[in-house]
Amino acid sequence: MAGCCVSAEDRENQRISEEIERQLRKDKRDSRRELKLLLLGTGESGKSTFIKQMRIIHGGGYTDEDKRSYAKLVFQNIYTSMQAMIRAMEALGIAFSDPQNQTNAGTVLGVEVDKVEELDPAHAKFIKSLWQDAGVQESYERRREYQLSDSTKYYLSDLERISQPSYLPDLQDILRVRVPTTGIIEYPFDMENVIFR
């Protein structure tokens, strides 16, 4: 008899209340399987690489669109590495074995890395010639005397593939790309029914 005296408004309020309770129980259950992970470390210690690896193994990986956005970063890493080796040659008193590479070096040094969107075919040719120069190789061998990305040899040795117009970075290219991380980056991923944030 009490049920027939309940107004439509009261029934709606009861339904909303039950829905809220159900959502709260679900949120509580979900929060029990969610762990927050804070990665701390010095620059270039592998924090971003760890997140990239977790994304590949336990996350959704990288779409072709994601990979295309990394191509620009790969190109920038190539220019940054070559510029660092050229500058180190000057500081270390190393000469180019091929005099033509002095001109090529000037062209590469003139590139504003932050503005690089693609690898210009002429520049790719210059960079390849520079990488094969004995002076640049000596500079590379003495890389412990200045700062140089760990992925330098990886990218420069594979310049033929990377300089193709159809280039799409593979997972190894993405893992090796160096991007200075500033601020906080959150990437959630599931691992055996546990959500890491």
Image (cartoon, rainbow, N blue to C red):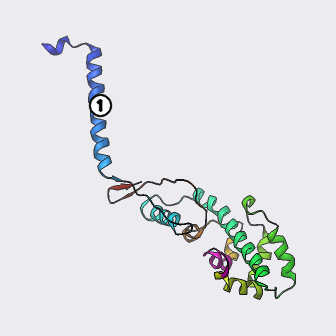
- Left or right: residue 97 compared with residue 145: right
Amino acid type, mark 1? Glu
Residue designated by label 1: 19
Q: Is residue 50 above or below residue 190?
A: below
Rendering quarter of residue 119: bottom right
Q: Quadrant of the N terminus?
A: top left
Rendering quarter of residue 80: bottom right
Residue at the far left: name it: 1
Residue 163 showing in the rendered view: no
Residue at the far top: name it: 5
Q: Which residues are magenta?
A: 145-158
Q: Is residue 124 above or below residue 135?
A: above
Residue 53 pos. (x, y %)? 48, 66
Q: In percent of the image, x 63 and y 60: which residue is there?
A: 68
Residue 168 pos. (x, y %)? 63, 65
Q: Nearer the viewer, residue 102 or 182?
A: 182
Secondary structure at numbered mark 1: helix
Q: In percent of the image, x 32 and y 56: which residue is there?
A: 193
